[in-house]
Image (cartoon, rainbow, N blue to C red):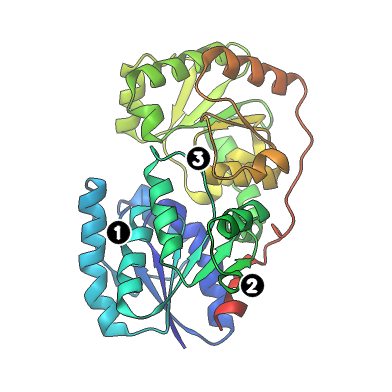
Amino acid sequence: MRIVCVAGARPNYMKIKPVMDALEARGAEVVLVHTGQHYDAAMSDVFFEDLRIRRPDHFLQVGSGSHAVQTGRVMAAFEPLLEELRPEAVVVVGDVNSTLGCALVTAKGGALLGHVEAGLRSRDWEMPEEVNRVVTDRVSDYLFAPSPDAVANLRAEGYRTDQIHLVGNVMVDTLLANLDRALASDVLGRLGLARGEYALVTLHRPANVDDPAALGTLLAALDDLSRECPIVLPAHPRAAAQLRSSGMSERVRVIPPAGYLDFVALQASARMVLTDSGGVQEETTVLGVPCLTLRDNTERPITLTEGTNQLVGRDRERIVKTALSVLAAPPPGRCPALWDGRAGERIAAVLM
């Protein structure tokens, strides 16, 4: 059985690896296609090395561009490859433009389509990822949901029961498989950090970093918080320059972007994490580290009800007040059922 697995951007790599491993363990011929949506070493190569993902069988080199341009390039490059490979099934993961582009081509090309992380909903149509995930679910044959809330969303939207499979979280598979290696990292020593004595921040969503008013509010909140707890923020040099020009405090320490293992180590040792990333909400929940999400909504509400995450939006006073409360009394760790490191196996069992 030939199955094409698609990855294109940094969040995809952690999600596709356990699916590939489980399918190959069951005897499938797995063809790995890298669309090249993220293509530089810091966003791609280091993650393949850290996660021990084999070299892609096909690299589409679509590069950057607007949403329409990037999605169109993915479709134009993937269509002839799909016709050549003629797989029984294609597996796409997450909600990036590569996910949507390859899903649309597959739906029109005749192969069965499986979507990993199906059913996640923020209900925020200003997020391009929400459009991607909703459309990808609509054209998929297999809907692999990471949590009961995702299953409920799919049922409410009218999907057939036989399409929906509650499998757990593939991000957790990768995290648990690599946790010992991550904790052995010397990244804290290299950066001169001490365990439990800093807050880790990640910012990347356009609603936060492309809107000067929103970014200014967030940076002011980080400045306030940095008076109480040292803050570390990984960022590319270009992004760091943008943050500085937007008025970021010198007390917020900007460090180079981290590979997967180093970043997990930084999360695990942080006193608290502030983020706008969906994956970080999940990883901090598994690691038992308090997380404040700098958004007004999340497509991963289970991290609020059964994890360590809290939504704090982009209000300066609310962010600081909640952060100080968490520093004074960290919430207890909680982790959802089926986030046990076996989601990839469950997906492979359905497909095979």
Depth check, front residue: 171 or 71: 71
Report x, y in % for residue 319: 58, 19
Residue 7, by quadrant, is: bottom left
Question: Which residue has dot 3 on it?
Answer: 277
Q: What's the distance in space between the residues labelled 2 and 3, CA to CA?
A: 25 Å
Q: Which one is in front in this view, the residue at disc 1 or the one at disc 2?
A: 2
Q: At 56% from the left edge and 42% from the top edge, which residue is drawn?
A: 280
- Residue 346: numbered disc: 2
The three-letter code of the residue at mark 2 reads Arg
- Left or right of residue 141: residue 310: right
Image coordinates for residue 86, horizontal then vertical, percent: 33, 85
Quadrant (top left/top right/bottom left/bottom right) for the C terminus: bottom right
User: In terms of sequence position, does the residue under pointer 3 or pointer 1 come before the other?
Assistant: 1
Q: Secondary structure at mark 3?
A: loop
Q: Nearer the viewer, mark 3 or mark 1?
A: 3
Secondary structure at numbered mark 2 = helix
| First in residue order: circle 2 vs circle 3 | 3
Residue type beneath disc 1: Gly
Label 1 element class: loop
Q: Residues within 10 Å of mark 3 (few under 14, many from 20)?
A: some
Amino acid bearing label 3: Ser
Residue 109 position by quadrant: bottom left
> At which x and y percent is residue 75?
25, 65
The residue tagged 1 is: 36
